Image (spheres, rainbow, N blue to C red):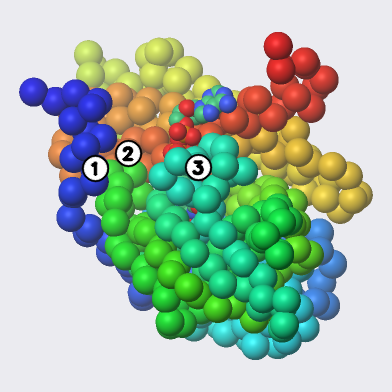
Amino acid sequence: MNSLATDLAAGEERPATASFDHEGWTRITATGVFRTLADTNLSQADRIRETATRMKAFGRAGENPGLLFAVATHLASTITAVTRFGSDDLKEELVPRLVTGESIGAHAITEATAGSDASAMLATAVVDDADGSVILQGHKIFITNAPIATHIVVYARTYRSGEDQGISAYVVDTTWSGVVTTAKYPTASLPDSPIGEVDLENVKVPQTWRLGGEGAGLQILDFVMKREIVYAFSADLGRIERRIDDCVAFANSRQQFNSRLATYQSVSFTIAEMYIDCLAGTAMINEILRRIAENRDITKEVAAAKVVISDANLKTAVDASQILGGKGVQAGSDSVQAVLDALAGPIYSGTNRIQKTRIAAMLGLLTDG
Ligand SMILES: Cc1cc2nc3c(=O)[nH]c(=O)nc-3n(C[C@H](O)[C@H](O)[C@H](O)COP(=O)(O)OP(=O)(O)OC[C@H]3O[C@@H](n4cnc5c(N)ncnc54)[C@H](O)[C@@H]3O)c2cc1C
């Protein structure tokens, strides 16, 4: 018999089956989306807008959701973090390789006992006063792109002369001594997004490979996660638009009781509701892009958009499978995989429950009892 407890225990032992669409990665790279995000001839706001627009187009074109999550992770975790917070040396060394897709980025925050509460992380970075380098130790889990990454932004608590300096962000080359990445946690959701663990044992990181100031890690994380949400969930919006088209075509062509399914309001209204959800999500992303261009805070807006779009992706995926009838629940069908893929949206990039907690705090609700 199965139970949640046996599921959790089995999760430790399941073999890794991470697959990665290298051809897809090359195809996405060839569109110039990585280069655009790093293009210093464009304003910050234009880079983000253009990147979000392309991610939506990839979703609409039917690119694999797992591949697109790997792309969103690369864009936010590493291209954004290095171009915005990296030293000149680091930018010179890494950006040319990140934009050609030759280098693949990831970010490692989550640990076994630090999930939603990133500040509880146990990974450490001990500073060598002589040259400012650090020695990293830690174990990170659930890291998107870990099995394929060439560079990982590792978040760790920094200690200088034994004193806690707060969490900082360091870029690590996965070929360095002491860095071990393992493919693990094959997920039913986004199976084509390689995910795994990162082990760091006495990894020496030069000072110039730290992002931003010492102790600025959580601010950097907040900055990049907001961008990850814009890119990953723009792709979801494209996916929902495509789903609506598919449902309209099916409802117009399938006949039952001598009428097209489209003539039954319970079907047509379901598809109309998909459109309403998609339009709401699109308006929210547009509002975020407008606020970025005006240099305004986007904390509440990003949290709200993430909740609305990830919930809409899941709801519309379930609704689409119901509209298809028996075909919609066939094992291995696209509609079943779409439901499974959509299950992860409310979890990654900060769970929806945590996003609502953030909104509540921003609204001034006194949430500490
Ligand atoms: C597909 C996928 C990709 C991922 N990629 C990465 C990655 O690239 N890098 C990385 O570092 N991590 C990654 N993660 C990990 C992800 O960030 C964590 O799963 C997430 O932060 C939640 O942590 P947790 O799984 O430990 O759940 P927990 O934090 O244990 O939470 C369990 C449940 O309790 C709820 N909960 C927890 N605290 C509160 C609270 N204060 N108030 C209300 N509800 C609460 C949560 O919302 C959740 O529903 C990924 C996860 C997935 C599924």
Which one is closest to the eye, mark 2 or mark 1? Answer: 1
Image-based side of 128 in relation to 27, left or right:
right
**The residue at label 3 has a CB less than 8 Å from ligand 1:** yes
Residue 99, percent from left and from top: 60, 79
Q: Which of the two labelled residues, at mark 3 and mark 2, occupies the earlier sequence position?
A: 3
Residue type at mark 3?
Answer: Ala
Residue 170, percent from left and from top: 62, 68
Q: Is residue 57 above or below residue 24?
A: above
Identify which residue is drawn at 40% across, 51% down.
142
Residue linked to disc 2: 340
Residue type at mark 1?
Answer: Gly
Q: How crowded is mark 1: few (under 14 residues within 10 Å), some or many (20 or more)?
A: some
Q: Is residue 249 above or below residue 326?
A: below
Identify which residue is drawn at 74% across, 35% down.
301
Identify which residue is drawn at 28% across, 44% down.
188
Report helix, strand or loop for mark 3: loop
Farthest residue to the right: give it.
Answer: 294
Residue 275, percent from left and from top: 55, 30
Q: Distance between the residues labelled 2 and 1?
A: 17 Å
Which one is closest to the eye, mark 3 or mark 2? Answer: 3
Q: In this view, does 359 lie above or below 289?
A: above
Q: Return the residue nearer the eye: 47 or 229.
A: 229
**The C terminus sits in image quarter:** top right
Residue linked to disc 3: 114
Would you identify the image quadrant in which residue 23 lies?
bottom left
